[in-house]
Image (cartoon, rainbow, N blue to C red):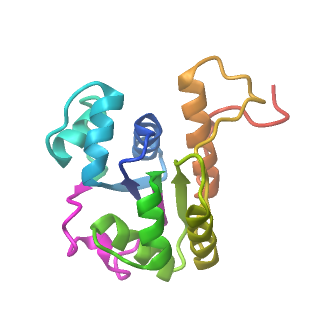
Amino acid sequence: MRRFVVGITGASGSLCARSVVRHLSRHPEVERVHVVLSLFSLQTMSVELGRKAQDETEGLRLLLDGETNERIVLHRSADMAASISSGSYPTDGMVVVPCSGGTLAAIANGTSSSLLHRAAEVTLKERRPLVLAFRETPISLVHIENMRRAAQAGAVLYPLTPAFYNRPQGMDEIVEHFTARIFDLLRLPHSLGKRWGTS
């Protein structure tokens, strides 16, 4: 059984974060999903999902729309002693979805000021898959340099930009396609979305 970490930042993309956490926690090969919400993610989720989240517990509840799942473990962003802050705790990879420019910078430059940053640092140093679902536009040279540094360190940059070859019929299909591609990058088998060349 596999374990994954999901970091959620204050960039736009709460629907994508919701989809990744839900599908990971329901996957038959996944035993545990460790979730870390940045403080700014609570503000964005409140706007994008339509209800106020006062703290991380409410934020996770909002993200899951009241659904509960015993496979999901919520960690406080300030808890630098959490299990996922150590390389001795085994995980199979991490996704930061959405990934803000500030979080990208912290990861690319190794400046861990929160558990989300530290968990990503651990993922890189242990040579585990790290997918950064970057969500900032337009992209500045600072972003490009930080992307380069993160990629050289082993991260995969996966900007949250929609595909249109699958002719999505709505937002749900666009979001599911994001999740499908992230699962591909984590080497998780799935039947989500529509692949190129299939009907």
Residue 33, position as x, y percentages in the image: 36, 54
Q: Is residue 82 in the magenta section?
A: yes
Image quarter in which the N terminus is found = bottom left
Q: Nearer the viewer, residue 21 or 32?
A: 21
Q: Residue furthest right?
A: 197
Name the quadrant containing residue 149.
Answer: bottom right
Name the quadrant containing residue 73.
Answer: bottom left
Name the quadrant containing residue 83.
Answer: bottom left
Image quarter in which the C terminus is found = top right
Q: Residue at x 15, y 45 (%)?
A: 55
Residue 3 in view, yes or no: no
Left-right relation of 40 to 17: left
| Span of residues in magenta | 74-95
Q: Residue furthest top?
A: 169
Q: Is residue 54 above or below residue 106?
A: above
Residue 161 in view, yes or no: yes
Left-right relation of 59 to 122: left
Residue 151, position as x, y percentages in the image: 62, 71
Left-right relation of 142 to 11: right
Q: Is residue 131 in the magenta section?
A: no
Q: Residue at x 41, y 77 (%)?
A: 122
Q: Residue furthest left?
A: 54
Q: Nearer the viewer, residue 91 or 117?
A: 117
Q: Nearer the viewer, residue 107 or 194?
A: 107
Q: Residue at x 58, y 78 (%)?
A: 153
Q: Residue at x 48, y 64 (%)?
A: 104
- Dominant SS of magenta comes to loop
Residue 61, position as x, y percentages in the image: 23, 37
